[in-house]
Amino acid sequence: MNPRPSGSVLAADPLARVTALPGVREAADRARAAVDTLLRHRVLRRQSAEVTAEASLRVARASAALEGHEISLDGLRGYLSGAGTDAPLTPAAPNPAAQSAPPAGGEVPAALLPAGLPSLATPALDQPSPVVLGTVRLCAELGMLAPAWERAPRQALARMHVLLGRGYLPDDELGRPRADAGTRELLDPLRLGPPPHSVETSVRLDGLTGLLVAPTTAPAVVVAAVVHGELLALRPFGVLDGVIARAAARLVLISRGLDPKALTATDVGHLEVDQVDDSGTPILGYRDAAAAYVNGGAQGVTAWVLHCARALELAARESLAICEALGRAAA
């Protein structure tokens, strides 16, 4: 089988045209190989749920940080383990202050607290923001959103916004498309500039959801990158859109079978991309790559997809480290 689609296929398949951009296929293949290496790790035969939980916790912390809400991993882990959950990390001690009051923004999902991973330090008594806790909540429920994502992506996006924004946004703004004029200022943590008009946004969202349900020869890495970039560009809700975009990209990897158990710590990779990859190809950091996608035409799209592929490689390595830590703890 020829892995490179013919011209006629490229004409009918916009995502295949993205894959045909210089260096994209090779970068996607490297990312796929890194994920495949992770999926073969011996720890996953018995402890895949623990790896998913730990990777999701790291994804939540990294995604919140990219949105401007910083917290240390140990601080978040310590807060959650002391917030009334029934699966605390060992040997982390509960946080008495967190036990005395429920966390802002709703319940804390115990599913994101895997047993068996040793804490690297005594957990800091950090107080997570409602956005951090909403991101944790969204990551915990992402697997349950996969069927809705495959069937009706726009409805899944609205549900994601409800999960994320509860306790942070007014109830009447949860899951609602942004208006072009309103009382709430549009947030732009990546400094991408004003988003498109709401009418254009709706049209482009329709086009994006059409791409998601149409056949394509493009690898999942490329599809996830395009979904991620488009949602960053459109900012359909006006607030927390970056977290939604990153979660949607992760859903693509889950639903298209590249990472069906959500084992890769995807957003950690976005934080850790170096300026040059292992082959010497220049790779932009997250904010610069997102700006390139929004403003840079075909070259910008290429830069963005190369960033996303490299981030997925690093995410797979992060999860390999989780597997190794679990293996040592069980030895």
Image: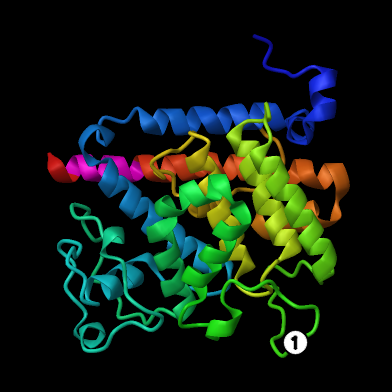
Q: Quadrant of the N terminus?
A: top right
Query: Which image quarter: residue 84?
Result: bottom left
Q: Where does the image place residue 56, in percent across and percent down from the top left? A: 39, 55
Query: Which image quarter: residue 24?
Result: top right
Please name the residue shown 76% across and 35% down the image: 18
Residue 317 located within the stretch drawn in magenta: no
Please name the residue shown 85% across and 51% down the image: 296
Determine the main secondary structure of the stretch shown in magenta: helix
Taking the image as shown, residue 118 lies to the left or right of residue 134, namely left
Residue 66 vertical placement versus 208 (above, below): below
Which span of residues is magenta-colored? 321-328
Q: Residue furthest top?
A: 1
Residue 324 located within the stretch drawn in magenta: yes
Please name the residue shown 44% across and 28% down the image: 36
Q: Quadrant of the C terminus?
A: top left
Badge 1 element: loop
Q: Where does the image place residue 251, in percent across and percent down from the top left? A: 52, 48
Taking the image as shown, residue 69 lies to the left or right of residue 4, namely left
Taking the image as shown, residue 86 lies to the left or right of residue 189, namely left
User: Number of numbered discs present?
Assistant: 1
Q: Label 1 sits on what residue type?
A: Gly
Residue 33 appearing in the image: yes
Q: Which residue is mark 1?
A: 182
**The one of 173 and 126 positioned closer to us in this rendering:** 173
Residue 278 appearing in the image: no
Taking the image as shown, residue 86 lies to the left or right of residue 133, namely left
